[in-house]
Amino acid sequence: MNLERRIETFGAEKIFIAVFIVFGVMILFMRPPYQLMDEINHLPRAWQISEGVFLSPTMTIRDFAGLGDLRARKIFCLDGAPADAWNDKVYVAEVPVSFLPDKFITDANHKHYVHAFAAEDVQAFLSTPLNADEQEPIQIPNTGVYPPLTYLPQAVVALIGRALNLNAGIIFYLMGLSGLFFVAACVWWSMKFLPEAKQLIFVLAMMPTFLIEAASTSADAVTFGVCLLGTAWLLSLRQSTERLSRGELVGLIVLSIMLACCKSVYGTILLLYFLMPRERVKHFWTLGAALLLLNLFLLAFWSWLSVELSDAALYTNYYLGYTDRNLAAQKVFVIENPMAFFVAMMNSLIKHGLHYLAHFVGMWGFLCNLMLPPWFYISYGLTIIFFALSNGLSFKLGERALLIFAASVSAIAFFLFDYLIWSAVGSEVIDGIQGRYFIPVALMIFGALSILPPMRHKNSIALAVGVFSGIAMLWTNYLAFY
């Protein structure tokens, strides 16, 4: 019996998910804590939620700076904000000092890598007592606005760990494991819902960026998992003409809520509802509209609750000293010159397209400055396209158009958001875009490209590609930090 038949007989999904979890656990313990973009701000938000603080408290930049020379100011410091912004409020959280050993903490202005990391460092962290009452404040201006459900697995584990008085390092790694297993469950069910595209799903899940973010305290774990599972499930619903069950109706409502708790730009995944046969729902268009309105209402309500009610400042480059950034002026510019925004978006894709691809496939580190060799991005990118073209999904032209439209609207939305927040007024290039933003819509994009018959030995090839990616990720991580 050849390898392909053995994999199929045993169950390709079982092997794929085992590989995903094994490499996820290895990278979680090999990667120094907080060596992901914004992870030092994600953990405090998750911890805060575990304490029942769903609306993050705020503090003016001036008051925070007046607390003294705390380690927290080195983690995320807004001391470079213009003088007229020092009275603006930003979100803050307090976390146990035991989560912030000097060995791991990076300086926002100088120290970006944790050099000479060793297994002894993990062991020391695992044996560090929690001492939950000894806390330090941390500014979390970019994560304090995130809804509680965005950190559900990590917050639940933090709550249990605190109740059991586990050591700080144990809680930290359990929070990362909770994210990993949540995403693994989403990947598993995605492959079960779309068995014809399970190889494509596995190859996407084994991208270093996807896997490393999944095995972390970052909100990206829940975002990646929910968006992947939601896309796969909605696509599977089009394959039947039976009436939706009560469980499926509840599932649609839960999905609408969870997508609202992820980054707001990914609510377009709900548009895939309209791919279902109309006879599956008695009031087809009414239910579809209701799901979209529920998603938009929750987004607006949480924005009002967490931003407007708290009077918190929306975090922009202005608070880092880039005074040519002005949210209000940029809004006016876009309204008056909408084509200028689209030109800037196209310029950004042309100028930074390769960087987006590299970050999409695999880049990490405190400033997303740890990269794999160029040949890895080329080979893995071509592999994804190869699996996309022969993924086995069958779509009509209109269905493909809806998939591309939904993904495009999300992409335009986060380009627009970063144009408003991170770019100079009237800029011809958009700053702040990261390739990982495309991951939640990746299955829509690549799923729509299927035009070739399924390849031979697809399970064996996918498994080899996934293992190759995992080894390359671990080796690159080792060379960077050890």
Image (cartoon, rainbow, N blue to C red):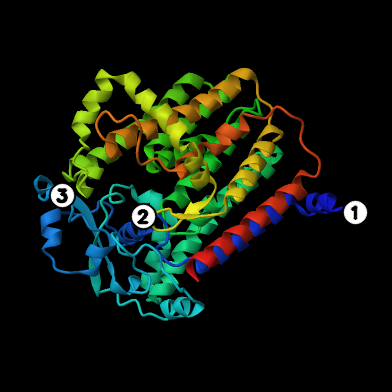
Secondary element under disc 1, as helix, strand or loop, is: loop
The label nearer to you, 2 versus 3, is 2
Residue 89 at x, y = what percent? 15, 49
Quarter of image, res 106 = bottom left
Q: Which mark is residue 89?
A: 3
294 or 346: nearer the eye? 346
Secondary element under disc 3, as helix, strand or loop, is: strand
Quadrant (top left/top right/bottom left/bottom right) for the N terminus: bottom right
Q: First in sequence: mark 2 or mark 1? A: 1
Q: First in sequence: mark 2 or mark 3? A: 2
Secondary element under disc 2, as helix, strand or loop, is: loop
Label 1 neighbourhood size at 10 Å, few (<14), some (14-19), many (20+)? Answer: few
Q: Which mark is residue 38?
A: 2
Residue plotted at (63% across, 61% down) = 471
Residue 260 at x, y = what percent? 39, 39
Amino acid type at image mark 2 = Asp
The span from disc 2 to disc 1 (Cα, nearest Å) is: 48 Å
Label 2 neighbourhood size at 10 Å, few (<14), some (14-19), many (20+)? Answer: many
The span from disc 2 to disc 3 (Cα, nearest Å) is: 19 Å
Task: Check disc 1 and report the residue beneath it.
Answer: 1
Amino acid type at image mark 1 = Met
* Residue 189 shown left or right of residue 432 in the figure: right
Residue plotted at (49% across, 33% down) = 269
